[in-house]
């Protein structure tokens, strides 16, 4: 990897370290202070939930979708009363009638609602705080972990001196990240990659299931979320000159939900280069252990989306 490296990925993860964090004065916060912050945030959350619960629904459909000149039945899907069958309305008038009926049902349900019960909000707030107390602090730099009370971090608060120091670090990381992105875009866009190959490389967050190499041919099997008709894809590297698989890149796939295969590895980012008459493909992959590199130099690339579910 030249640009989309592990270091680049780490920079990307820390672009918003202060998002949602409240800056508070520097001082030693007692147990009583932290309990007061907790209670303040809980009361705010309950008040917001109560307001949402007691706010009547509004008619918020986009009128342009009902314009006869722009109307498309595929933009609407309703359930037939009694049978539960789904259908697309064939005219704007039919769509409006169905929308108004749905809205009136929602409005009637709102008017029949029971009094607001804060218990669910309180339970969710408590569970969220406990989860953040256990995990959230781990995403901050080591010096933050060592100097800021974890309970304050779990309540989205940080003393001023630590806040200001971290803000400077975030700005520096953002600048470094943007500069590296600009360099990557300049060099990668200048590569002589056929459009059909470049456009086909759209595998972010795909499950990486298997990698097989036989002689000068290597095949990477992926599963792309959202492509339920043909979820499996293979990238075939033909005329492989060399293949570098970082130590520790071990792929394990198993049956998951809805009969689809899942893996311990996900596809993150790639870089495509044209080196003389060969392609050089740099891939950054996520595994449950660590980020790993996979790099292939080959003469040709073939991508097939019409792949049958593989047998384990």
Image: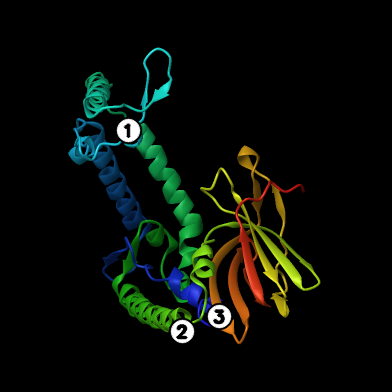
Give the secondary structure at mark 2: helix
Q: Position of residue 260 (x, y in %)?
A: 64, 44
Taking depth in this image into account, of 245 and 34 the one nearest to the observer is 245
Q: Nearer the viewer, mark 2 or mark 1?
A: 1
The crowding category of the residue bearing disc 3, from other C-alpha atoms within 10 Å (few below 14, some 14 to 19, many at least 20), is: some
Give the percent coordinates (x, y) of residue 54.
21, 31
Residue at disc 1, secondary structure: helix
In this view of the protein, can residue 165 be seen by the observer? yes
Query: Considering depth in this image, is 43 or 258 the residue closer to the camera?
Result: 258
Q: Which residue is mark 2?
A: 187
Q: Is residue 261 above or below residue 65?
A: below
Left or right of 277: which side holds 152? Answer: left
Q: CA distance from mark 3 to mark 2?
A: 9 Å
Is the C-beta separation of discs 2 and 1 under 8 Å? no
Quadrant placement of the N terminus: bottom right
- Determine the residue located farthest toward the bottom in the rendered image: 276
Residue, disc 3: 273
Element class at badge 3? strand
Report which residue position mark 1 lands on. 73
* Mark sitting earlier along the chain (3/1): 1
């Amino acid at each position: 990897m030249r640009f989309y490296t592990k270091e680049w990925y780490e920079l990307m993860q820390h672009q918003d370290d202060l998002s949602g964090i409240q800056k508070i004065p520097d001082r030693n916060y007692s147990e009583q202070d932290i309990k007061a912050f907790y209670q303040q945030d809980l009361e705010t959350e309950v008040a917001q939930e109560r307001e949402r619960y007691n706010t009547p629904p509004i008619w918020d459909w986009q009128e342009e979708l009902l314009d006869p000149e722009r109307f498309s039945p595929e933009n609407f899907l309703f359930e037939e009363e009694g049978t539960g069958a789904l259908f697309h309305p064939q005219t704007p008038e039919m769509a409006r009638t169905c929308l108004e009926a749905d809205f009136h049902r929602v409005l009637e349900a709102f008017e029949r609602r029971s009094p607001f019960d804060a218990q669910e909000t309180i339970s969710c707030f408590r569970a969220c705080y406990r989860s953040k107390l256990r995990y959230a602090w781990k995403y901050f730099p080591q010096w933050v972990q060592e100097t800021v009370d974890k309970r304050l971090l779990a309540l989205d608060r940080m003393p001023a001196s630590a806040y200001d120091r971290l803000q400077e670090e975030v700005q520096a990381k953002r600048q470094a990240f943007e500069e590296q992105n600009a360099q990557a875009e300049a060099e990668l866009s200048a590569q002589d990659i056929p459009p059909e190959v470049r456009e086909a490389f759209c595998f972010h967050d795909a499950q990486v299931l298997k990698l097989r190499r036989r002689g000068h041919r290597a095949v990477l099997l992926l599963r792309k979320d959202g492509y339920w008709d043909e979820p499996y894809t293979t990238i075939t590297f033909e005329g492989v000159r060399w293949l570098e698989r970082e130590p520790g890149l071990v792929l394990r796939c198993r049956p998951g939900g809805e009969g689809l295969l899942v893996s311990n590895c996900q596809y993150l980012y790639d870089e495509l280069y044209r080196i003389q008459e060969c392609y050089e493909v740099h891939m950054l992959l996520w595994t449950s252990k660590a980020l790993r590199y996979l790099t292939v130099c080959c003469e040709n690339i073939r991508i097939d989306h019409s792949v049958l579910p593989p047998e384990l």
